[in-house]
Image (cartoon, helix red, strand yellow):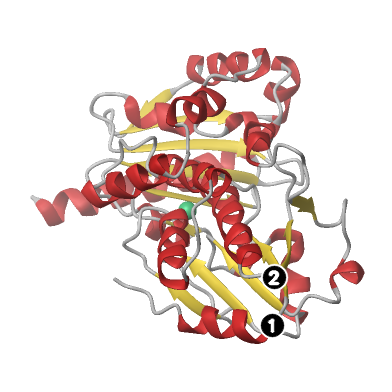
Amino acid sequence: MSIDWTPLADLIETHDRFLVTTHVRPDGDALGSEVGMAGLLRQKGKDVRVVNSSMTPPRYAFLDPDRSLFEHFGADVGPGALGDREVLVILDLSAWNQLGDMAGFVREFPGPRVVVDHHVSQDDLGATFLKDTTAEATGTLVVRAFHDLGGTLTPEVATGLLTAIAMDTGWFRHPNTNAQTLRTVAELVDAGAEIDRIYRLLFEQNTLGRLKLMGETLSRLRTDACGRIAYATISRDDLASTGAIPQDSEDLVDFTVSMSGVKVGLLFIEQARGGVKVSLRSRDGLDCAGLAGRFGGGGHRAAAGATLPDPMSESVERVLDAVRKALDEDGRSTA
Ligand SMILES: [Mn+2]
């Protein structure tokens, strides 16, 4: 799927002050794509602010080494200070509930808004969608924007965009990794992204708290549906007892589907504001986005998430029940 970048080109032609944002609990694709988009817009002479509804997880601090780029909505900056922004560019999300505390601000934003994204689930958002759901990462789309709009991939931008693609492909292991992915990565390495340094910064910066949380979580891993489901839970107490922070749970769900024979892996995380976030991962094609959608969430076929209002034990039962049924239906349809 190719994207016609004309709407963004037109906005760049006619406006000066841009606001870039992304989803709650931003990941590497979200933040790396912001680095890329901010770089592109600044090369076009635009005044750019990048404001997110969540704090930048420490893991991604290297994307903003002098802490001049990412601003935290509600903490660093309020809606009043953003009154001069003319255009809103939303990256890596297509659903209101992914905007977190910025949803109200985005709803009332008077200027044009553009969404650059690769997610399947979609709300209206009152935006122009520049979207390719076959792309492995939003970062890939931003690379294409550089090509189409005539930007230069600087080492800083290339570092962000390589991080974006690396994280959404599980460091080039997931089925969404293809030859074109690697060509794009090669281009980013040529542009100055240091792949060994990025790997070290992303994967070899564990804190004692994260490693302990990992151990705690794995020690309680359980299976269901004759070993086709693996799941684990993380409570608020687990965070406190291990000294981990909420962001330390990122990627831990991937361990659930690393077990032989597992088709669906689930990680349930008790939320500070109440409710439980479930992350879903599948192998062999079960549709996680569809399952998450039943609980008000969304995502991709192989990776999705949702937040349930119920306490932990009920949330686990509700989701397990839905996954068991989906596996049975899937078994019948492919039998
Ligand atoms: Mn993404």
User: Residue 322: x, y in percent?
Assistant: 39, 51
Name the one closer to the observer, 87 or 305: 87
> Residue 38 versus residue 318: which sits nearer the camera?
38
Whether residue 176 is visible, yes or no, is no
Q: Are marks 2 and 1 in contact (CB under 8 Å)?
A: yes
Front position in the image: 307 or 3: 3
Question: Residue 2's quadrant in the figure?
Answer: bottom left
Q: SS class of the residue under badge 2? A: loop
Q: Horizontal and vertical percent for residue 54?
A: 73, 49
Q: Position of residue 175 (x, y in %)?
A: 26, 44
Q: Is residue 225 left or right of residue 284?
A: right
Tell me if 116 is positioned left or right of 301 in this view.
right
Specify the label residue 15 is tagged with: 1
Q: Residue at x 77, y 46 (%)?
A: 273
- The 10 Å Cα crowd at callout 1, few under 14, some 14 to 19, many 20 or more, is some
- Determine the CA span between mark 2 and mark 1: 8 Å
Amino acid type assigned to the residue bearing label 1 in the image:
His
Does 327 sit above or below residue 204? below
Pointer 2 residue: 46
Q: Which callout, 2 or 1, points at the residue further toward the start of the chain?
A: 1
Q: Residue furthest right?
A: 80
